[in-house]
Amino acid sequence: VVGVPGQARADTYVHLFEWKWPDVARECEVFLGPKGYKGVQISPPNEHIPLSEWWARYQPVSYRLESRGGTRSQFIDMVQRCNAAGVEVYADLVINHTASLNNGGVGSGGTSWTVRNHPGLYGPQDYHQPTCTVNNYQNASNVQNCDLVGLPDLNTGSSSVQQTIANYINDLVAIGVKGFRIDASKHMAPGDIAGIRGRVSGSPYIFQEVIDLGGEAVTANQYYGNGDVTEFKYSANIGNQFKNGQLKNLSNFGEGWGFMPNAYAVVFTDNHDNQRGHGAGGTNILTYKDGNLYTLANVFMLGWPYGYAQVMSSYAFTNTDAGPPGVSVHSGSTVNCFGSAWQCEHRWRPIANMVAFRKAAQGVGVSNWWDNGNNQIAFARSGKGFVVINREGGALSRSFATTLPGGTYCDIINGDFANGTCSGPTVVVDANGNAAFNVPAMSSAAIHINAVGSGG
Ligand code: LM2
Ligand code: CA
């Protein structure tokens, strides 16, 4: 048995990368709320440099809510509608630095600026001096007090800078934003983040982007005092196992692999950076381009009681700098997903339905682990659910002790359960808890106690 039952994580949020606010709002209402996603991470809502590349969003010009995502009023409407749908909005906070492009210009909201000079917000005295370049990851002060890829490094230790940042966060909190991803947290001293947090009203959820794959001066554990932290080792290792390893190795995936304590970890197969070779994680990162393999890895992640799970929702790209498609996701009742633009991984049936599995398995750990010594695995979330993953070229036909009460369960990987009926195949669990599964090559099956009919 692995996984500490009391700490088994129950929830999932989705990153709707570069979605516009009206599309996010509608998605909260028609899909995320009904499927049980707890939250949605949005791209940075602040004013940014006016380039088409996705990373323009990571060069703040001001904290006005005028961005490629939409206007302030569209932002407010989105937050209200997502809250009404039971979905928390997590804003991506870019607060380590400000813009550097071409010595200045005009931002996405019409604000004029020059490098280290943002009228009403910051002047030269608000940046770390003398200026230096992040180039030595063995030296925490270099990592935290110098310019990251040429981006002017705010003096986040100063109380006036902390207050300016907190004013921005408090504006978002007042609108109804429930959580924050703190971009480039590794590049700010943990005490600086604590200082900002201390000036924020309420106690929003925060998770800090700290890339810690080992071997550096700044480590993830230094940030636990502030809140959750991204576990990049999870992303790198799940990719490596699904691409090159053996799934039998995953029987103690999590703390047993030297990952951070379950209670702090935010986990993902890929994020918007490492799916395109930015950020970190190496060459084995799984993405939507991996098709079935990607689905299987996400089924594992959502079935497994480690971390707060992030589902990535991407747009198709070949150029790793390319910005989002011009077309809207929603137009009338048409949903523009799965084609050559928006990929909507969060709507892929196995991924979408495993969100409810994860909730159903709340509070219980893993038992009845089985593997074939290679790439076929199965496990129970004791008394709550059962997952079978077949990452091999042949079918997997076998009877398992599921730990579940007898009944006819919906295989939620291959069908949807609604109003007591299953649109796809069912799995019969007998009175002793045993059930026969027949899982084709490169496929999976999953059942849980909130998708079961009567009888059996
Ligand atoms: C991060 N973590 O701490 C992200 O992992 C990283 O992807 C972000 O960079 C970074 N923080 C800053 O928020 C991204 C992107 C970079 C891009 C920056 C700023 O990965 O490529 O840098 O945003 O937009 C771009 C150019 C780069 C240039 C820089 C400054 O790609 O060549 O450097 O702007 O003008 C001279
Ligand atoms: Ca810094």
Image (cartoon, rainbow, N blue to C red):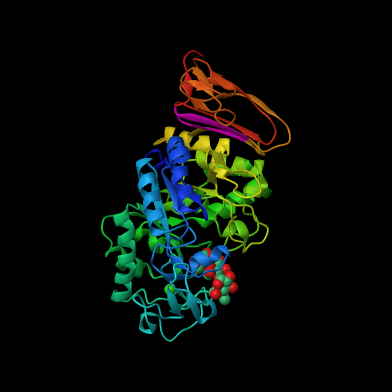
**Res 280 → quadrant:** bottom right
Residue 365, can we see it? Answer: no
What residue appears at the point 41 percent right and 54 percent down from the top-left corner? 74
Residue 276 on image: x %, y %:
62, 59
What residue appears at the point 42 percent right and 73 percent down from the top-left corner? 111
33 is higher (above) or lower (below) than 111: above
Counting the numbered discs, the total is 0
Residue 101 on image: x %, y %:
53, 76
Q: Residue furthest bottom?
A: 130
- In screen coordinates, is 317 left or right of 156? right
Q: Residue furthest right?
A: 393
The quadrant where ligand 2 appears is bottom left
Task: Name the residue nearer the viewer: 101 or 7.
Answer: 101
Let me know if residue 383 is in the magenta part: yes
Residue 215 on image: x %, y %:
53, 67
Residue 264 on image: x %, y %:
40, 52
**Res 160 → quadrant:** bottom left
Secondary structure character of the magenta stretch overall: strand
Q: Residue furthest front?
A: 332
Let me know if residue 251 is in the magenta part: no
- In screen coordinates, is 101 left or right of 91? right
The magenta region covers 377-389
Task: Name the residue nearer the viewer: 107 or 127.
Answer: 107
- In screen coordinates, is 397 left or right of 58? right
